[in-house]
């Protein structure tokens, strides 16, 4: 939603927050407001080519990270790598990193 408005050149953060409250009723209004403020700021700073790439493709971040789990194990010298969706009920996240996760910027916890 934010990307569409940024690409059109007219961002109405208030309308984004209102749409977000409707679509994501299980998320607190404060988190929705913070997310859209941050997202629009980041999207405005993003090079047009990158924004267009994101807009044109349906990117499955979960699948990308799952496919990269062997690489991540090697890079972090880890026994295992667990990948979770944001709505998984059994997330192991002792430092609440998932609260900082946004699209294209996954939360990573290394133990």
Image (cartoon, helix red, strand yellow):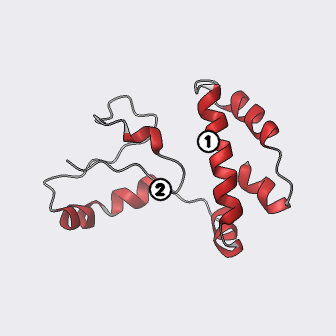
Check contact, mark 1 vs mark 2: CB within 8 A.
Answer: no
Taking the spot 16% from the left edge, 57% from the top edge, the residue there is 78
Classify residue 16 as left or right of residue 9. left
Other-residue count near label 1 (Cα within 10 Å), few / some / many at <14 / 14–19 / ≥20: some
- In the displayed structure, 15 sits above or below 7; it is above
Q: Quadrant of residue 22?
A: top right
Taking the spot 67% from the left edge, 59% from the top edge, the residue there is 43
Q: Nearer the viewer, residue 54 or 15?
A: 15
Q: Secondary structure at mark 1?
A: helix
Classify residue 12 as left or right of residue 25. right
Q: Quadrant of residue 10?
A: bottom right
Give the image location of residue 41, x and y in percent: 68, 55
Q: Which residue is mark 2?
A: 61
Give the image location of residue 96, x and y in percent: 36, 35
Other-residue count near label 2 (Cα within 10 Å), few / some / many at <14 / 14–19 / ≥20: some
Give the image location of residue 61, x and y in percent: 47, 56
Q: Secondary structure at mark 2?
A: helix
- Quote the CA–CA distance across marks 1 and 2: 18 Å
Classify residue 31 as left or right of residue 82. right
1 or 2: tag closer to the N-terminus: 1
Taking the spot 64% from the left edge, 34% from the top edge, the residue there is 32
What label sits on residue 35 in the rendered view?
Answer: 1
What label sits on residue 64 in the rendered view?
Answer: none
Taking the spot 82% from the left edge, 51% from the top edge, the residue there is 11
Q: Quadrant of residue 51?
A: bottom right
Badge nearest the viewer, 1 or 2: 1
């Amino acid at each position: 939603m934010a990307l569409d408005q940024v690409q059109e050149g007219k961002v109405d953060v208030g309308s984004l927050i209102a749409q977000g409250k409707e679509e994501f009723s299980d998320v607190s209004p404060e988190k929705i407001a913070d997310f859209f403020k941050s997202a629009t700021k980041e999207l405005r700073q993003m090079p047009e080519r990158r924004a267009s790439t994101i807009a044109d493709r349906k990117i499955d971040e979960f699948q990308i990270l799952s496919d990269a789990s062997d690489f991540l194990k090697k890079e972090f010298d880890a026994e295992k790598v667990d990948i979770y969706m944001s709505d998984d009920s059994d997330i192991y996240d002792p430092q609440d990193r998932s609260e900082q996760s946004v699209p294209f910027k996954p939360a990573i916890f290394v133990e």
